[in-house]
Image (cartoon, rainbow, N blue to C red):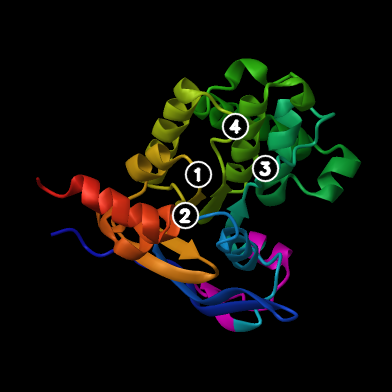
Amino acid sequence: MAAARATTLEAEGLTKRFGGLVALTDYSLRLASGEVLGLIGPNGAGKTTAFNLLTGVLRPSRGRIRLGEHELTGAKPEAFAVAGIARTFQNIRLFRDLTVWENVAVGLHRREGPGWLATILGLPEAGRREQELRERAAELLAQLGLAELVDRRAGDLAYGLQRKVEIARALATRPRVLLLDEPAAGMNATETATLTATLRRLAESEAGPALVVVEHDMRLVMSLCRRVQVLNRGLLLADGTPEEVQRDAAVVEAYLGSGRSRSRERADAPA
């Protein structure tokens, strides 16, 4: 039997209030190294709030967050990034006037840049490091099928390609956990299938990050994720394998409504 994987990201009892509105209640998560977790739910379920808490964009009203040896509860987003948490956004946030390579270089410099002093002084070390960064960027872009686009202006790319550039930039920081917010948005079926295969290879690689994926494309979620959490109205409804979640009565009702659930049950009942 394979040894159990160590817990990478741990959240306990996360609650977020905005005045009288409770957007998320008592949300908990234990994510193992290399795990791929899907986080799904109807619109307004609390998925974005959970993402913002897990990346430091929001501070929890209650609860705690820990990544490995790093206690992150209440920390700023920069501390989450330094600890090893990266994310993409539902609304793409690329530097549109920079090239594809330059966008990825932003992530690379975050971890692996030559340093400001060597750059300012024009030391040979700076030139060597820049070349190494370009080679690393080329590897990441090739992984995502973007090798031919390194010198293209990011803002000129099709929407689906911009999504991939954003993922490459996040991967450039060498995260321990990568949170993907609607990564397949704007992609056609072929592009989505290619992205799914790429993310699967990434998660299965020895140095690959754990993934948390918010996505409305259920085919992607159910084929990529070995575990799925379902949120509804800020509450965690279910946490299990894709098969378990699809059979969960509370999940069916949240997505379809009780009336439609009963109609489906009658339709599925034996004659």
Q: Position of residue 84 (x, y in %)?
A: 58, 59
- The CA distance from mark 1 to mark 2 is 7 Å
Helix, strand or loop for disc 2:
strand
Instruction: Specify whether residue 267 is in view.
Output: yes
Disc 1 from disc 3: Cα separation = 30 Å
Name the residue nearer the viewer: 24 or 251: 251
* Amino acid type of the residue tagged 3 in the rendering: Leu
Question: Residue, x 56% and y 60% (percent of image)?
Answer: 47
Q: Residue furthest front?
A: 271
First-in-chain label (3 vs 2)? 2
Identify the residue position indicated by label 3 in the image.
108
Question: Which residue is disc 2 drawn over?
Answer: 40
The residue beneath circle 1 is 216
First-in-chain label (4 vs 3): 3
Nearer to the camera, 151 or 216: 216
Task: Indicate which disc, 4 or 2, sits on the residue closer to the N terminus.
Answer: 2
Q: Nearer the viewer, mark 4 or mark 3?
A: 4
Q: Residue furthest top?
A: 148
Residue range corresponding to the magenta coloring: 63-81
Measuring from the top left, give residue 270's x and y in whole percent.
10, 47
Look at the numbered disc 1 and give the secondary structure of its residue: loop
Closer to us: 233 or 26: 233
Determine the secondary structure under disc 3: helix
